[in-house]
Image (spheres, helix red, strand yellow):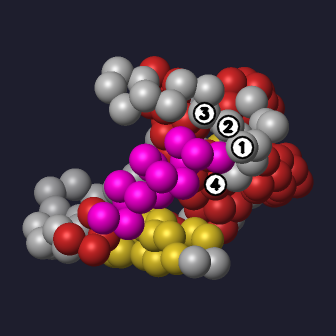
Amino acid sequence: MPKLRGDAIDAEFARIFVELLNRKGTENQYDIKKELRIAMDQHAGVYRTAKSMSEGLATVQNLKQRYQRISIQDKGQVYNTNLINALEVDNLLNLAEALLTAALAREESRGAHARTDFPTRDDEKWLKHTLVTYSQDGPKLSYKPVAITKWKPVERKY
């Protein structure tokens, strides 16, 4: 496990308890959360297309920009449910962006990831794990091979 650096902890503390709590924005975090839920329902369901996922990703990126303009009404640092929700919305936005970015890249159907524009499974190109990490430029994709041990993967037939 990586060792926690004091400067990273200090930066996160400042991000939450200095920057986030003191924002003077006009956006409502609860509206952003509701719009995110609707966007993910519409664009990241079981049956997906590149067009729909691209629209969803654009919506998520817009919501992330709007999130930068939220205001936390409760300025307290003890049992602050307004702050907790704001942090959850931030994490949900990042997760939604990561999910849609990875799903757009995976041009096949596999399990619960069913693309109507790529209806078949493609083990030659996509029998691998998709990993998402964040940089200053947003989500970055990398891949890791699947360790095949006892059972060879086969396509499910329903």
Q: Which mark is residue 97?
A: 4
Query: At 66% across and 67% down in the image, what residue appears?
Result: 105
For the residues labelled 1 and 3, the Cα–Cα distance comes to 8 Å
Q: Is residue 145 magenta?
A: no
Query: At 61% across and 27% down in the image, what residue appears?
Result: 73
- Dot 1: what SS? loop
First in sequence: mark 2 vs mark 4: 2
For the residues labelled 1 and 2, the Cα–Cα distance comes to 5 Å
Question: Horizontal placement of 80 versus 151: left or right?
Answer: right
Q: Name the residue type under label 2.
A: Ser
- Dot 3: what SS? loop
Front residue of this view, candidates 98 and 72: 72
- In the rendered image, the quadrant that contains the C terminus is top right
Q: Main secondary structure of the magenta part?
A: helix
Query: At 78% across and 36% down in the image, what residue appears?
Result: 27
For disc 3, the marked residue is 72
For the residues labelled 4 and 3, the Cα–Cα distance comes to 23 Å
For the residues labelled 4 and 1, the Cα–Cα distance comes to 25 Å
- Callout 3–callout 2 Cβ contact below 8 Å: yes
Q: Which mark is residue 24?
A: 1
Front residue of this view, candidates 118 and 97: 97
| Residue 123 visible somewhere in the drawing | yes
**Which stretch did the figure color magenta?**
10-23
For the residues labelled 2 and 4, the Cα–Cα distance comes to 22 Å
First in sequence: mark 4 vs mark 3: 3
Q: Which mark is residue 71?
A: 2
Quarter where residue 77 is shown: top left
